[in-house]
Amino acid sequence: MSTFGAATFGEFLSGGSDVPQWTREAEVEVVHIPGGNTSVIQTAGRMADKVTIKAKVTKANYTTLLGLVGTKATLDFSYGSRSAVLLSIGDAVEKLSYDVYIISLNFVGA
């Protein structure tokens, strides 16, 4: 079982063994010069690491997680433990008559 703050969730692993990983990207601004045939590329370091975790939750845990959007807490999941902010919850699907929701939890490392 995985946790974020006071909420628990089960990771919904694709094929039973695909573990989500933190991703990283550069912060880059590309500006095309009007009338020219080139662009100016400006870099400003890196953005914060991100991870999306597909999860299986009950309605009670889904409601708890909705209340945690935008908060910072410790995220414990199959890849490890780290301080994170829950950015959003997406792709929510309810499995009728089973009290089960499949959701995507989008985190940024803090």
Image (cartoon, helix red, strand yellow):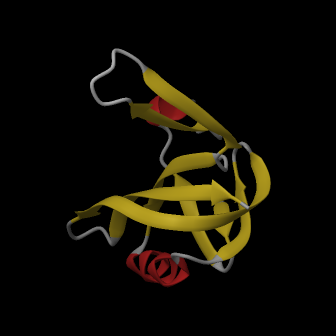
Q: Position of residue 23 (x, y in %)?
A: 62, 37
Is 86 rendered above or below residue 18? below
Outermost residue on the top side: it is 37
Answer with the quarter of the image where residue 9 lies: bottom right
Answer with the quarter of the image where residue 6 lies: bottom right
* Residue found 48% across the figure and 58% down from its top: 105
Front position in the image: 63 or 33: 33
Front position in the image: 86 or 38: 38
Q: Confirm whether residue 84 shows in the render.
A: yes
Residue 56 horizontal side relative to residue 18, left or right = left
Q: Confirm whether residue 19 shows in the render.
A: no
Quadrant (top left, top right, bottom left, bottom right) of the N terminus = bottom right
Is 17 rendered above or below residue 82? above
Q: Where is residue 95 in the image (x, y as percent from the top left)?
A: 25, 62
Q: Where is residue 12 in the image (x, y as percent from the top left)?
A: 48, 47
* Residue found 22% across the figure and 70% down from its top: 97
* Residue found 45% across the figure and 79% down from its top: 66
Outermost residue on the left side: it is 96
Q: Where is residue 58 in the image (x, y as percent from the top left)?
A: 42, 72
* Residue found 35% across the figure and 64% down from its top: 101
Is 109 rendered above or below residue 15? below
Residue 103 horizontal side relative to residue 5, left or right = left
Is 65 rendered above or below residue 31? below
Residue 3 horizontal side relative to residue 103, left or right = right
